[in-house]
């Protein structure tokens, strides 16, 4: 097991303007941004009992904004794939072996990883 873990946080121009302004104001010295972010996270935990987050609250609207686009792309791709299979079958080419859709499997794996992170 690694002695460190990497955390990736995406900030969006309109939704996270306050955080981006704060982050951009941090000096660019070696490790300064990392130290500032860790300090801010620790300050957020300082008011909690045992310095652990209690009752994590999720912003449902933000969660939907984040999850719906990849879900929509996945559903659209599945529908396109199934329609293509139906069109082939209806054209009398039922004996054609369609290649496995590795791209679809990759999308499902990526979506699963995104939902679990």
Image: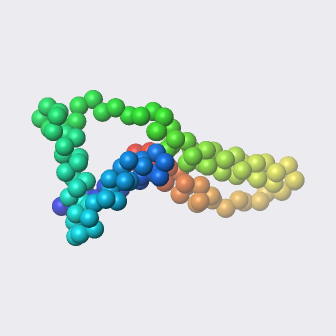
Q: Is residue 99 left or right of residue 43?
A: right
Quadrant where the N terminus sits is bottom left
Quick check: 77 above or below 68? below
**Which residue corresponds to the image point at 45% horizontal and 33% vertical from the top-left?**
60
- Residue 50 in the image: x percent, y percent? 12, 35
Residue 117 drawn at (x, y percent): 38, 48
Residue 75 in view = yes
Picture colour scheme: rainbow
Q: Is residue 51 left or right of residue 65?
A: left
Say if residue 1 shows up in the picture.
no
Q: Residue at x 77, y 59 (%)?
A: 96
Q: Position of residue 62 (x, y in %)?
A: 46, 39
The total number of labels drawn is 0
Tell me if 109 is positioned left or right of 97 in this view.
left
Nearest to the observer: residue 7 or residue 10: 10
Q: Which residue occupies 38% across, 34% down?
A: 58
Q: Would you say 90 lies left or right of 12 here?
A: right
Instruction: Between residue 45 and residue 25, name the one nearer to us.
Output: 25
Q: Residue furthest top?
A: 55
At a point 79% along the width and 57% down the height, the residue shown is 95
Q: Is residue 16 above or below residue 93?
A: above
- Reply above or below: 56 against 27: above
Front position in the image: 64 or 73 = 64
Question: Where in the figure is residue 74, as x and y percent of width and height?
Answer: 60, 48
Check the image and name the residue furthest to the right: 91
Q: Residue furthest left?
A: 50
């Amino acid at each position: 097991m690694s002695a460190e873990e990497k955390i990736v946080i995406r900030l969006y121009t309109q939704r996270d303007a306050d955080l981006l302004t704060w982050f951009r104001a941090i000096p660019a010295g070696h490790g300064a941004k990392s130290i500032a972010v860790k300090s801010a996270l620790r300050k957020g935990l300082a008011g909690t009992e045992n310095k652990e987050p209690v009752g994590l609250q999720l912003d449902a609207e933000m969660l939907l904004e984040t999850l719906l686009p990849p879900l929509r792309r996945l559903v659209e791709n599945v529908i396109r794939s199934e329609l293509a299979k139906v069109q082939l079958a209806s054209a009398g080419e039922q004996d054609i072996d369609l290649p496995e859709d590795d791209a679809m499997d990759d999308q499902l794996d990526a979506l699963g990883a995104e939902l679990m992170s």
